[in-house]
Image (spheres, rainbow, N blue to C red):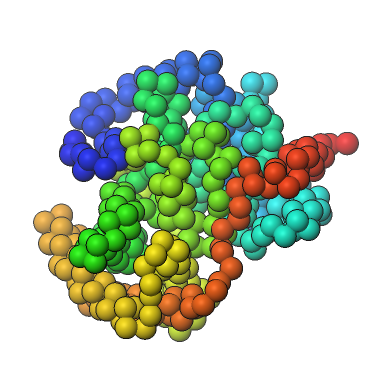
Amino acid sequence: MADFHQEGFITTLHSLYEAFDRDAYLEALEKKLVEYSNHLNISLLLPCLYSELKNPQVLDPIVNHISKVQYLHSIVVALGGANHEQFQEARHYFSKLRTDARDLKVVWVDGPGIKEVLDRIRGKDITTGVSGKGQSVWLALGYLLGTEHAHVVALHDCDIATYDRLLLGRLIEPVANPNNDFEFCKGYYARISPTERAMKGRVTRLFVVPFVDAMMKIMRERGFYELENFFRYHRSFNYPLAGEFSFTTYLARGLNIAYDWGLEVSTLSEVYNKVITKKIAQVDLAPNYEHKHQAMSDKDAQKGLHRMVVDIAKFYLNYMRSHGFALDDAIIDMILHTYYQNALAFIKSYSDDAEVNNLVFDRYREEQAAHFFRGFLWTAWEHSKGPQLSTQIPSWNRVLYSLPDIYDHLKFVVDRDNSDG
């Protein structure tokens, strides 16, 4: 069970319920959420690849758990990687989530109707990114905002092998609860492989956390106190790369959305720039969390953890430059060596943690991963030199300014794709 320690920058909501009866807690939690849903509309956004329908041992339990909750007003599935026949198959598959009291829409992000919407937006010289999770989330969010029915939106992936509806309820409660006054809540959890009995989440543990921790210290030493606070904020999150979060639609309207692997850290940064920290929380969602793992792909910068680290590092480097911290080869050389030494110190702590918990811990592989990540950081610098196009899709508020009828167009397309006529 988690402790009740608060870092002080953002509020951490722990899993203290584990000391008591879990079933009774779930019943009480869902009863509260049903009561909240009488006064506000709660929506769930599910980014999903068609290929995930071919993994029923993971997706079926997720859908079955969601189908049992009674507090969701609507569910929007952002379906990627599907042709027309596959889109219809997905519509049929997810239709079990529709009830008399709950709407369901599947956004066919590769369909001709969505292409028309994207072409209109690009016609106003507004970037729409490239196909992927970020663009899919942005499109589905635009549909939800256009309906003007949603007040709170939760988002999680469709590859969670350890999913249950307690995770969903805990993800939503902090923002839906009118007594909390939170506008954004990020999920976190432990990542331990039940088969290998080993720590996972390498990019979080071995890159993001030691990098952000090192940058926080460097910015303080060099007098860049605003950037120190920015990195201290990111350091406050227990799992910054978690794909689960909830937020108000008021906040969502103004968020730029990254379309690459920087989606999660970009979203945290957008929230940092738009919301006071006392309205931000993180919540412990589950005792353990398991989903698909990415390969290192150390030879190919377009795949796996290699691409993930490069995209995340590029976001941080560009953020630093855009906030007055000049970068050159010498500064980056210092940063990557500082990061690496910090990563080795974290690896020692992870090793001690694994030892006392009787986990398998391959220190050589951990240090090798940090060595690769140090090289990927230099690659990110090489890619980000000079003027670069942003990897963020502008907020729907910005799109609406240039295309006042874009919500109507998007709603028309999604509703037409989901009709049986």
Front residue (pair 173, 182): 182
Question: Looking at the image, is 168 positioned above or below residue 395?
Answer: above
Which quarter of the picture shows residue 338?
bottom left
Question: Looking at the image, is 388 positioned above or below residue 420?
Answer: below
Q: Could you tell me which residue is drawn at 39 percent across and 65 percent down?
A: 324
Q: Could you tell me which residue is drawn at 43 percent across and 56 percent down?
A: 265
Q: Is residue 142 visible?
A: yes
Q: Could you tell me which residue is drawn at 47 percent across and 19 percent down?
A: 36
Question: Looking at the image, is 233 positioned above or below residue 182?
Answer: below
Q: How many marks?
A: 0
Left or right relative to 214: residue 139: right
Left or right relative to 352: residue 400: right
Residue 321 percent location from the top left of the image: 42, 67
Q: Could you tell me which residue is drawn at 29 percent across and 74 percent down?
A: 335
- Quadrant location, the C terminus: top right
Residue 396 percent location from the top left of the image: 64, 44
Question: Looking at the image, is 300 positioned above or below residue 274?
Answer: below
Which quarter of the picture shows residue 51?
bottom right
Front residue (pair 55, 217): 217
Which quarter of the picture shows residue 132?
bottom right
Residue 71 percent location from the top left of the image: 52, 23
- Quadrant location, the N terminus: top left
Residue furthest right as drawn: 421
